[in-house]
Every structure is written in C-alpha cells, then in structure tokens.
Image (tube, rainbow, N blue to C red):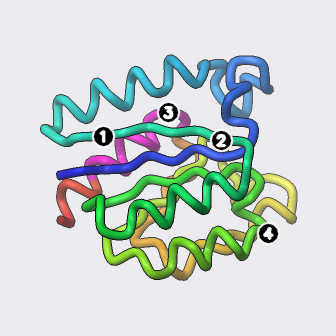
Amino acid sequence: MRILVLNGVNLNVLGSRDPAQYGGISLAELESRIYDWARQLELTVHCRQTNSEAEFIHWCHDAYDAVDGMVVNPGAWTHYAWSIRDALEPLRAPIVEVHLSNVDAREEWRRLSVLADIVAARFVGHGPDGYRMALEYLKEHR
C-alpha cells in the first residue's frame, strides 16, 4: 500500500515552535517516526513538506493515480486554502487529515477545516502519534 504524507506551511520549523502545542519534535524526527511506523505496518510511505502552496497542490495532482492513501497536514492552509481542498477532492484514495495540536480547541479561526468534508478521518491533538493513527486507519480501511 502506497501512502503519501504531505506536510504544509511551517512544519519545517517544528522543534522551534511552541513545544506545548507541537511537541518539540523536529520535522526530521517526525518523518523518521512515520517511516518506522510504516515499516511496522508494511506500508510504503513517502513524506514531503513545502511552504509553497503551489508545490503542495502539484503534489496533490501527482498523487491522483499514484497512491493508495494520503495523510495531509496542510498547517495553516487548512483553514483557508480552498485551492488545496479543490486539488484533493478528485483523489480516489482515502485522505486522512492530521494536526499535531488540537486545532478544534484553539483559536476560533483554527477550528475551520476546508478539508473536513472530503477526508475519511481526522486526527487532531495527538501530537506525532496522530500520524501513526492515520497510517493505521488507512491500512485498516484499504
């Protein structure tokens, strides 16, 4: 099973951001855990991160016929980037939305997810384990 993990804006500065919200883990450490979990679950995973909305959208387009599932954490784009939602909507594979912090309990503007109606599942506020939960979900619901 081929899974694409897309991390968006500002996730490259994990470890420098508020550890109470984001866990103090770097992106490299997060990706290392994701690859370990994928091996344990016998999944093939590819992780990518960008601060360019256009690049994120191109990766979504490239995934249409290339993946069996997708894990996305668009960062702040989650709350307003309808272009990312539109890029993900045609994907036939299940999509799981992940956020390290509990965006549903934070500032009001963070509570809106433009992806909520097109994703198969959401895991928010579980820190890095949310990615493990997303991979497990995709394996169980293939």
Disc 1/disc 4 C-alpha distance (Å): 27 Å
Crowding at dot 4, Cα within 10 Å, few <14 / some 14-19 / many 20+, comes out as: some
Disc 2 crowd, CA 10 A, few/some/many (<14, 14-19, 20+): some
Magenta stretch, residue numbers:
127-136
For label 1, the residue is 45
Instruction: Quickly name the residue at label 3.
Output: 128
Above/below status of 103 relative to 109: above
3 or 2: mark nearer the eye: 2
Give the CA distance from mark 1 to mark 3.
16 Å
Amino acid on which disc 3 is placed: Pro
Contact check, label 3 and label 4, Cβ < 8 Å: no
Which residue in the rendered view is the most extreme toward the left?
Answer: 42
- Which labelled disc corresponds to residue 50? 2
Q: Nearer the viewer, mark 1 or mark 3?
A: 1
At horizontal 70% and vertical 49% (from top left) the residue drawn is: 75
Provide residue 97's location: percent of width, then percent of height. Answer: 51, 59
